[in-house]
Amino acid sequence: MRDLQRPAASFAVWLLLAVSWVASVDAAVRIRPDQGVTFEQVDFSSFPQGSATSDHMVIRADPALLAATTGIRRGYINIDCDAGWIVRNLLIDLSDAFVVAAFSRAGIDQLFRVTLFSAFVEISPEPLLTFSRPERDVFPVGPVVYNARGIGDGEPTTPPLRHDAEQTFTADGENYSVMLPNISNIEAADNQCFPASIANSLQYLEDRYNIVVPHDNVPGLNGDNSLVGRLDALSGRMATSRASGQGISFLPMMAGKGLYLDQSGLTDSLVHRHQGMVDGGDVSTPGLTSTDDGEQVTFEWICDQIKAQNDVELSFSYEDAAGNMIGGHAVRVVGCGKLKGVPWIKYAHDMTQANPEGGDDAGTVVQRSFLRDTDNDGRLNLEASNVELLFAVSESVTDEIRSGPQAPPQTSREAVTNGANFGPALSPGAITTIFGDFDRLPETNEPRLTAEDADQNSGLPTEIAGASVTIDGVPAPLFFSGPGQINFQIPYEIKPGEASVVVTIGGASSAVYSMEIGPTAPGLFLLPPSIAGQGRAIIQYQDLSLNTPENPATVGQVVVVYLTGLGEVDNPVPTGQPALASPLSLPVAASSATIGGQEAEVQFLGLTPGFVGLAQANLRIPNLPAGDHLMVITIGDLASNEALVAVAP
């Protein structure tokens, strides 16, 4: 092997233009009782035709306890019982406090209180497509009251249904998630769900954008000085106590919300849009104008609002056997995504409004439900055919506030790119760039890349100028931070699969975006176009000069090409630390290279000693005619971007 050729320290600028951790687990893990999943039998006694001993069940998943007992920080829960796989691919991660899913058809006799439930429960790092019928454990069952409602003037006579199992996942289906930060969720009084969803939304916008909401988001009622109490009063929602109140319909609630915004001086700070069952298109009341975006609520619209870090208040109906609306419920949407092609939303609400058994201090949950048109009437259902999406309201701040000095970082899933070629391929250890509006960051910071930049004990910093990035909760080492982009290394602790990324600047966090991490992600660094035109690889010679049309390589010459995204290496390097010259670190995956379509001899391919996240390939130029030729390096199953190499006559 020839001696390694290293780039000059100043070369890092060109390259960069272009906590606790729970060990990752590759296979599904069986969950036993007391390991983070519990079951409750639903009490529908507050519905006129409900029963205290229904055949509905609720599963609660505790992500922190699951991570501690299984080693999986982010995964998918599946549950099998006598009725089949009644929960499939329930996504949980450590950004949640509790995740709740509800289901029926669980084979429970409605006439008896159930104290034990036979089920097989497992959590897998990746969503499953097929489900076997394994041996089961016996889980204890507790009671839980479900009386979530408050949309419409009538009282729902029958309880809502939930069917969480009848989903068709496809192997190549789209897989992503977006979650809003700052989840607020107050205890709602009886039938107070609509005012509570608005109060939670306003709290989110206050936390996120520093608008001033003059009343506190605490449990309250018509007549008091709480935020939800003021919304009760201004919308005309009647309530004699927190345990007894009426529901309210869309237009009076919007009118009450508009009055509150007007009285609080917030009208000019907020922007509203809506979809769904609203007569007359646009809604205009004193203090509020909402633009109509369509007759039916669509998943794409909801998720676009969440991706834009807007808030969404969603209302859905409860229907009788004939399809007539008999009431409904309002929630605040806090996340959305697709799971192997199946769309889902995550929403915050009070499942047990004015809970008669647990007192008025329990029942607030974050719940995940798939969306599909189960009854084929053109309107999306929240899994069950008698629960349909009615209308959704997006509440956001003006562009002036969104881009103001106190605005939180704004980015997107698509903005997370390979730091070499700005493509979508990412892998553990790779240099990565995330683009966005990070206006609170200073214009210039010295890029970091070398051993001289890394502290001998802790490596590269995980914060620069108040900016930080976490991947699945693990702080990422930073190379650079600026108003338009942040460059970081994906921690080696993050294993291939879906992971969550969060940008935090000055204590304010972006939304939580999912990104796909692959085993490898070879990306070739390119020269700035001002040096030698577009699309040229960064290639050095022994004398550290660059390959350009004016300084081409000769046939048989060994050149050094720079890249990132090797994935796992045989001699691991700690995250954020520079690679060593001895021992060298080579990719575990097989590798090869071509130039001009011909195989190029790879004399060395591995991490560049003295640099963080940077790799190099020492390649021999094959027998090619003079001119520019495209080079590709393949590691594992993934090929890099194409880049030009100049070859001499």
Image (tube, grey):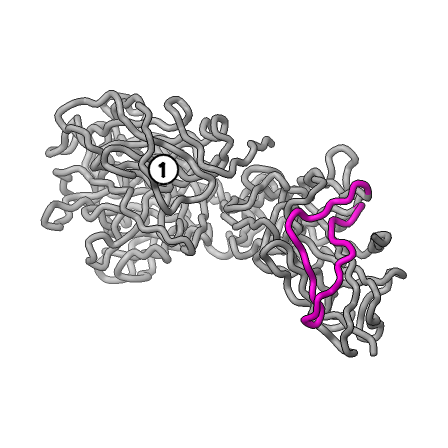
Q: Which sits in the foreground, 627 or 164? A: 627
Q: What stretch is highlighted in magenta?
A: 582-610
**How far from the left and from the top, in percent, is residue 276?**
26, 56
Rendered position, 203 above or below 112: below
Q: Which of 525 and 392 is in front in this view?
A: 525
Determine the secondary structure under disc 1: strand
Which quadrant of the figure contains the C terminus?
A: bottom right
In percent of width and height, residue 422 lies at 62, 60
Give me the residue at 12% from left, 45% from top: 320
Q: Choose between 348 and 96: the one closer to the eye.
A: 96
In reply to whether residue 583 is colored magenta, the answer given is yes
Q: In this view, does 48 lie above or below 517?
A: above
Residue 364: tell me if it is visible. Answer: no
Question: Pointer 1: what residue?
Answer: 78
Does residue 243 show up magenta in the picture?
no
Q: Position of residue 306 (x, y in %)?
A: 42, 51
